[in-house]
C-alpha cells in the first residue's frame, strides 16, 4: 500500500536495537494460538510466495466484488499466469459496503474466487478492513470512478470507511460482517490466513483505529476459525499500535517497502515475538526493494512474503507513490509483475519467484524415554535450543531385536538422503540395533549387528553412534564395551566392575562389516563417544565414566582422520554435575554440546566458539519431559513438514 498518505509515520527510522527486550504479550487473549501451534502451521504451508491481488479490470476492492463488475474470467486467466510464475498464495481485500448491500452475494462471489484460486494451487489471505484512502473518498457502491491517468492507485477507498472506524454506533454491524465472513469460511482450507485489517491508522487515523483492530481480533476469534489471524505492523514498529497488533497476532506480519537494512531492522523486531513472520507487502523497485535484494533475506530468515501487485491494470500501481495526473508509465515500475497480456515485466524476477525457498535445514533430536521399551522418539527445534516432541510424543519405531530396547538412538543422514540409525538393544548383549528410513516415519526391517560376539567375556555394547567418513566413503560405527581384564590399570574405576573403552567397525552398505577393533583408549573408563567434523579435523566428545573417584563429565579430543588416532582427552567441558550422552552441532560460529543430566532428570548444554572455552547454557535449552540420551541432527524442510503432520 502507498505510504505517502501518512508520511510522518512511514518514514520512522527503525534502529536495530529498538524494542530489544524480550517480548511478553500483555492482555493476551486466551485463544491466541500457542507459538508451537503457529510454527507447526507455518511449516506445513511454507514457503509462502504470494502477491497482493486485484484483477486488472478492478480499480479497487468495491469494483472487484460488486455483482456487476465481478470478473471470474479475468481472475481465472490471471491466476493461471500467477501459477505459472510460481506463486502459491494471494492476498485479497473484501469491502464491507459490498457485504452490507448483499451479504449472500459477496459470500457466493468469494466462494467462486476461492474455487478458481484453488484450481491453480493458490491459497488466499483474506482482508476485511483497510484504512487506506488514496482517492480521498469514503467507500461507495455502483459504478466506481475511472482511474486518473498517471496517478498511483487513484480509485482506492477504505473499508469499512474512515468515519465508521470510530463510530461505535455502527460497530454491531461491523461485528456481524466479521463474524459472517470468518464464520462462513473459518474452516475452509482454501483460505490460508485472515489478515483482519490492512494498515490501521493510515489516512491520518493514527491510534484511533486501534480499538477497531482489537475488536476485529475478538470478533473473529469468537467464530473459532481453523486458520490463524494477523494484522500487520506497517509504520513505527515501536508504537503502541504496532506492538499491540503483533501481540494479538497468531502469525506476526509486517509491510516492508524499505531497502535491505530497513527490512533487516523490521525483522529484528518482528522475530522477538517468537512466532513465524510473513511480509504481507513488499516490492518497491525504485528504492532497491527488489526481489534480487530482499528474497535472499526472506529465504535466510524463513519469511513468507506477498509483493504488491500481479497484473498492471486499473489500479496503476506500477506508477510511483506521489505520481501526478498525466505522468507517463515509468521505465522502472514501482509494483506489479505482469503486463496486461501476461508478459512478465522482468523475466529474471519470475525465475526468482519460482526458485524461492527457505535456506538451511531444521533441527531434530532423537531420544528415548524410560528404559527405551517403547522405542524411538523425535523432537524438533527452529533455534537449536527449544525442542518440541513430534508425533504427539509417541514412539516412531518399536524395538524388535536383541533385548527389545531402543536406548541411545543415533541418527545421521547419509549419501543419497537415507537416514541411518543405530541403538542400544540391551544392557548386557554383545550387539546393537540398526534400521534405515527415507522419511523417519517408515523404517526398514530392524537388524541386530553382533559387533562383540567374538569376545566371549564382553559384557555389553552401549551407546553406539554412526558417522559417515566422506574421505573414505564409509560409515564408522562405534560404541563402548567392557571386557574384564582388558585394561587392568582402571579395572576398579567403574560402576559394578564396568571398565569401558570405545570400539568400532566400518561398513559401506550395512551388510558386511570390518572386524571390530579398539577405537579409543584415553587411559580411563569412557563411554558415549560422538564425532563431528569441522575445518578439516575431526572432533570427538566422550564421557569420562570414572566412578572411583567420581568424574562423570564430558571431554573432547581431536584427530586429522575420522578413524583416528585421537589425541589426549581435554579437561572436562561440563560442570559440577554428572553428564552423559554428548551430542554436538555447530550453529553459526558456535559449537553447542547437548548432554543428559541424568541424575537431575533433565537435559543440559554448553557452548564454545573455540572448543577450548565453554559456557554452560543449560538454562537456555528445553527438551520434552523425560528426554534421555539422544542425537542432534539436521533435516530438510520437507521432511519436517511431513513429520509435523503427524501432530
Image (cartoon, grey):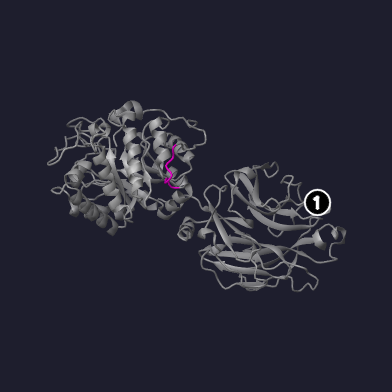
The residue lying at 19 percent from left, 53 percent from top is: 72
Question: The N terminus lies in which quarter of the figure?
Answer: top left
Q: Secondary structure at mark 1?
A: loop
For residue 319, above or below residue 80: above
Q: Position of residue 150 (x, y in %)?
A: 19, 34
Query: Which range is magenta?
Result: 27-33
Q: Main secondary structure of the magenta part?
A: loop
Q: Residues within 10 Å of mark 1 (few under 14, many from 20)?
A: few
Query: Viewer-proximal residue, 117 or 494?
Result: 494
Query: Viewer-proximal residue, 495 or 301?
Result: 495
Query: Viewer-proximal residue, 483 or 110?
Result: 110
Q: Position of residue 483 (x, y in %)?
A: 80, 66
The residue lying at 56 percent from left, 48 percent from top is: 386
Residue 320 visible in this rendered orientation of the protein: no
Residue under circle 1? 550
Quarter-wise, where is residue 523 in the image? bottom right
Inspect the magenta stretch and tell me whether residue 32 lies in it: yes
Most extreme residue toward the right, as rendered?
Answer: 489
Q: Position of residue 625 (x, y in %)?
A: 60, 54
For residue 509, above or below residue 141: below
Residue 266 visible in this rendered orientation of the protein: yes
47 left or right, relative to 592: left
409 left or right, relative to 358: right
Amino acid at each position: 500500500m502507498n505510504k505517502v498518505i501518512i508520511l510522518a509515520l512511514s518514514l520512522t527510522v527503525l534502529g536495530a536495537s529498538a524494542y530489544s527486550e524480550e517480548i511478553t504479550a500483555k492482555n493476551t487473549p486466551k485463544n491466541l494460538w500457542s507459538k508451537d501451534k503457529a510454527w507447526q502451521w507455518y511449516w506445513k504451508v511454507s514457503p509462502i510466495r504470494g502477491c497482493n491481488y486485484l484483477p486488472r479490470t478492478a480499480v479497487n476492492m468495491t469494483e472487484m466484488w460488486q455483482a456487476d463488475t465481478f470478473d471470474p474470467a479475468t481472475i481465472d486467466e490471471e491466476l493461471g499466469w500467477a501459477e505459472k510464475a510460481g506463486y502459491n498464495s494471494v492476498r485479497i481485500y473484501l469491502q464491507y459496503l459490498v457485504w452490507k448491500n448483499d451479504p449472500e452475494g459477496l459470500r457466493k462471489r468469494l466462494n467462486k474466487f476461492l474455487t478458481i484460486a484453488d484450481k491453480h494451487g493458490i491459497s488466499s489471505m483474506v482482508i476485511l478492513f483497510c484504512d487506506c484512502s488514496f482517492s480521498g473518498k469514503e467507500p461507495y457502491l455502483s459504478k466506481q470512478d475511472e482511474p486518473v491517468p498517471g496517478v498511483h492507485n487513484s480509485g482506492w477507498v477504505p473499508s469499512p470507511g474512515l468515519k465508521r472506524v470510530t463510530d461505535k454506533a455502527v460497530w454491531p454491524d461491523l461485528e456481524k460482517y466479521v463474524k459472517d465472513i470468518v464464520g462462513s469460511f473459518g474452516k475452509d482450507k482454501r483460505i490460508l490466513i485472515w489478515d483482519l485489517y490492512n494498515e490501521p491508522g493510515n489516512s491520518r487515523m493514527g491510534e484511533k483505529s486501534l480499538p477497531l483492530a482489537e475488536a476485529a481480533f475478538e470478533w473473529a476469534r469468537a467464530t473459532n476459525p481453523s486458520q490463524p489471524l494477523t494484522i500487520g505492523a506497517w509504520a513505527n514498529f515501536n508504537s503502541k499500535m504496532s506492538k499491540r497488533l503483533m501481540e494479538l497476532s497468531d502469525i506476526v506480519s509486517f509491510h516492508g517497502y524499505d531497502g535491505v537494512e530497513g527490512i533487516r531492522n523490521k525483522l529484528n523486531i518482528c522475530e522477538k515475538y517468537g512466532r513465524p513472520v510473513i511480509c504481507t507487502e513488499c516490492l518497491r523497485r525504485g528504492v532497491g526493494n527488489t526481489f534480487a535484494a530482499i528474497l535472499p533475506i526472506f529465504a535466510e530468515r524463513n519469511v513468507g512474503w506477498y509483493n504488491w501487485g500481479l497484473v498492471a491494470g486499473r489500479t496503476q500501481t506500477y506508477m510511483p507513490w506521489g505520481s501526478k495526473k498525466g505522468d507517463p508509465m515509468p521505465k522502472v515500475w514501482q509494483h506489479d509483475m505482469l503486463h496486461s497480456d501476461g508478459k512478465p515485466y522482468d523475466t529474471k524476477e519470475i525465475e526468482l519467484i519460482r526458485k524461492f525457498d527457505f535456506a538451511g535445514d531444521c533441527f531434530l533430536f532423537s531420544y528415548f524415554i524410560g528404559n527405551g521399551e517403547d522405542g524411538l522418539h523425535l523432537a524438533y527445534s527452529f533455534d537449536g535450543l527449544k525442542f518440541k516432541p513430534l508425533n504427539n510424543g509417541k514412539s516412531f519405531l518399536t524395538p524388535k531385536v536383541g533385548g527389545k530396547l531402543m536406548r541411545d538412538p543415533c541418527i545421521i543422514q547419509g549419501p543419497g538422503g537415507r537416514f541411518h540409525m543405530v541403538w542400544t538393544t540391551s544392557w548386557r548383549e554383545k550387539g546393537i540395533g540398526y534400521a534405515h528410513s527415507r522419511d523417519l516415519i517408515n523404517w526398514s526391517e530392524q537388524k541386530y549387528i553382533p559387533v562383540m560376539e567374538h569376545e566371549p567375556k564382553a559384557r555389553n555394547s552401549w551407546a553406539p553412534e554412526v558417522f559417515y567418513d566422506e574421505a573414505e566413503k564409509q560409515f564408522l560405527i562405534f560404541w563402548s564395551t567392557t571386557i574384564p581384564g582388558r585394561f587392568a590399570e582402571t579395572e576398579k574405576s567403574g560402576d559394578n566392575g564396568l571398565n569401558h573403552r570405545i570400539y568400532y567397525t566400518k561398513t559401506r552398505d550395512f551388510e558386511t562389516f570390518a572386524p571390530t577393533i579398539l577405537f579409543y583408549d584415553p587411559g580411563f573408563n569412557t563411554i558415549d563417544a560422538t564425532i563431528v567434523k569441522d575445518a578439516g579435523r575431526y572432533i570427538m566428545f566422550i564421557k569420562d565414566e570414572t566412578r572411583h573417584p567420581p568424574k562423570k563429565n564430558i571431554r573432547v579430543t581431536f584427530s586429522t582422520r575420522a578413524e583416528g588416532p585421537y589425541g589426549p582427552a581435554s579437561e572436562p567441558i561440563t560442570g559440577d554435575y554428572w553428564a552423559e550422552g554428548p551430542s554436538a552441532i555447530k550453529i553459526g560460529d558456535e559449537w553447542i554440546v547437548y548432554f543428559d543430566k541424568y541424575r537431575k532428570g533433565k537435559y543440559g548444554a554448553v557452548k564454545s566458539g573455540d572448543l577450548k572455552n565453554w559456557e554452560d547454557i543449560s538454562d537456555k535449552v528445553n527438551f520434552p519431559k523425560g528426554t534421555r540420551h539422544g542425537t542432534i541432527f539436521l533435516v530438510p524442510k520437507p521432511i519436517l513438514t511431513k513429520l509435523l503432520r503427524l501432530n
